[in-house]
Image (cartoon, grey):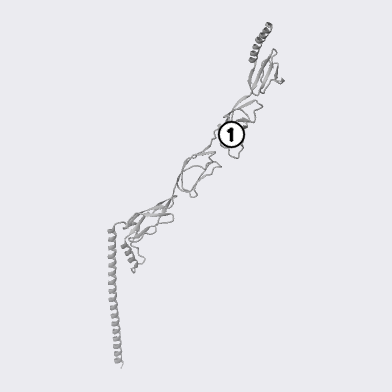
């Protein structure tokens, strides 16, 4: 019994140091794609048998150093892969392009998604590469959206409208046709885009107006001050004088600016009567109208009253002169008639005397 116990104790004391020594002799290396060589090794063995040369791929190996064996292993190289959502992916594209993988090294990584959502690679390079995905599951990958931004716009109205392009072929441009202020954003698929609103200001287009001389006489109705595009508005009042004209556009796309003849003139009716009398008087054909300039008329009634009185006096004198001329014409005509009769009698008398003298002398 003592003998058996002694053998057992000897075996225990011998095996424990060997086990510790064996554990200490196991060397660990990371895959590099190069041969893993042990100093002093005369041969290499795998778990399946001897090797021709030092190993390269991952696995467990033994090196014969002549005085014993060294155990070593080659472990897969860990490669960290950052997974992100591909913002350019669209429905109908290849599923393997949904996510983007970023890593260090020259690897051809093809992502594969397991039924539970975990990421793995189609190719592990014969077990030599251990791809570590972060995040590990597709549920943890934030689905990012592309932000569509545009600076604020300020332009002048254009008849064909103003078109704003996003720069992306799958997003329709924004078309604005009327002047005004707008807060707009692109009509983009919300699954893939986030369109940031921006401001668009379209200013009205300015049109210059060259107006005719608008006028009327006191008491008359205003002429038509409206077109298809704008309405002319004058200052209120019905007395003689000039009134400011302004243009009101019928469309918010245009502003009309009066650059010539921006006044409406109301004339005195006396001037209207004088003008008519001057026009119908005999002998006044081709003479200049006493209304020199409508635009020069003011709001001073006295001024026009004096002008009217002067014109009336001139008219009266003209009539008197004409009556005098008619009387003189009648007198002259009468004298002319008497003279003719006197001459006729004188000639008749001389003829009779000459006839009598001839009879006496020659008989």
Quarter of the N terminus within the rendering = top right
Count of numbered badges drawn on the protein:
1
Q: Quadrant of residue 3?
A: top right
Counting from the top left corner in percent of width and height, residue 332 is at: 28, 76
| Residue located farthest toward the bottom when viewing the structure as drawn | 363
| Residue located farthest toward the front when viewing the structure as drawn | 1
Q: Please tell me how crowded label 1 is: few (under 14), some (14-19), or many (20+) other residues with Cα within 10 Å.
A: some
Relative to 239, 197 lies left or right: right
Counting from the top left corner in percent of width and height, residue 156 is at: 46, 46
Examine the rendered structure and indicate whether residue 111 appears above or below residue 8: below
Examine the rendered structure and indicate whether residue 93 appears above or below residue 13: below
Q: Quadrant of residue 300?
A: bottom left
Residue at the image point whose x is 40% and y is 52% from the top: 248
Who is closer to the viewer here, 253 or 1? 1
Quarter of the C terminus within the rendering = bottom left
Determine whether the residue tagged by mark 1 lies in a helix, strand or loop.
Answer: strand
Residue at the image point whose x is 29% and y is 76% from the top: 330
Counting from the top left corner in percent of width and height, residue 251 is at: 44, 51
Counting from the top left corner in percent of width and height, residue 232 is at: 39, 55
Asked if residue 113 shows in the view, the reply is: no
Who is closer to the viewer here, 267 or 167? 167
Examine the rendered structure and indicate whether residue 32 appears above or below residue 248: above
Q: Quadrant of residue 298?
A: bottom left
Who is closer to the viewer here, 344 or 105? 105
Asked if residue 83 shows in the view, the reply is: yes
Mark 1 highlights which residue? 99
């Amino acid at each position: 019994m003592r003998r058996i116990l002694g053998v057992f104790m000897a075996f225990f004391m011998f095996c424990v140091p060997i086990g510790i020594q064996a554990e200490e002799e196991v060397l660990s290396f990371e895959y590099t794609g190069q041969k893993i060589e042990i100093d002093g090794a005369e041969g290499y063995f795998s778990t399946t048998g001897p090797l021709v040369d030092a190993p390269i791929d991952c696995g467990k190996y033994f090196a014969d150093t002549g005085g014993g064996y060294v155990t070593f292993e080659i472990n897969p190289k860990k490669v960290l892969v950052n997974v992100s959502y591909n913002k350019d992916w669209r429905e109908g594209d290849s599923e393997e392009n949904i996510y983007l993988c970023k890593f260090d090294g020259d690897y051809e990584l093809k992502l594969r998604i397991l039924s539970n959502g975990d990421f793995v690679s189609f190719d592990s390079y014969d077990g030599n590469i251990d791809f570590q995905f972060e995040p590990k599951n597709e549920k943890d990958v934030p689905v990012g959206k592309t932000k569509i931004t545009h600076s604020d716009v300020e332009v002048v109205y254009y008849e064909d409208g103003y078109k704003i392009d996003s720069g992306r072929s799958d997003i329709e441009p924004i078309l604005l046709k009327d002047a005004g202020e707008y807060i707009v954003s692109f009509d983009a698929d919300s699954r893939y885009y986030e369109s940031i609103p921006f401001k668009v200001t379209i200013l009205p287009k300015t049109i210059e107006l060259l107006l005719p001389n608008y006028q009327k006489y006191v008491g008359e109705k205003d002429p038509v001050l409206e077109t298809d595009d704008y309405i002319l508005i004058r200052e209120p009042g019905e007395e003689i004088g000039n009134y400011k004209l302004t243009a009101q556009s019928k469309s918010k796309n245009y502003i009309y600016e009066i650059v010539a003849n921006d006044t409406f003139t109301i004339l005195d009716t006396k001037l209207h009567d004088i003008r008519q009398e001057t026009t119908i008087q005999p002998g006044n054909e081709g003479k200049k109208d006493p209304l020199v300039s409508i635009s020069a008329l003011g709001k001073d009634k006295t001024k026009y009253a004096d002008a009217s009185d002067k014109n009336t006096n001139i008219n009266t004198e003209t009539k008197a002169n004409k009556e005098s001329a008619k009387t003189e014409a009648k007198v002259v005509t009468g004298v002319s008639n008497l003279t003719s009769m006197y001459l006729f009698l004188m000639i008749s008398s001389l003829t009779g005397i000459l006839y009598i003298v001839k009879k006496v002398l020659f008989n």
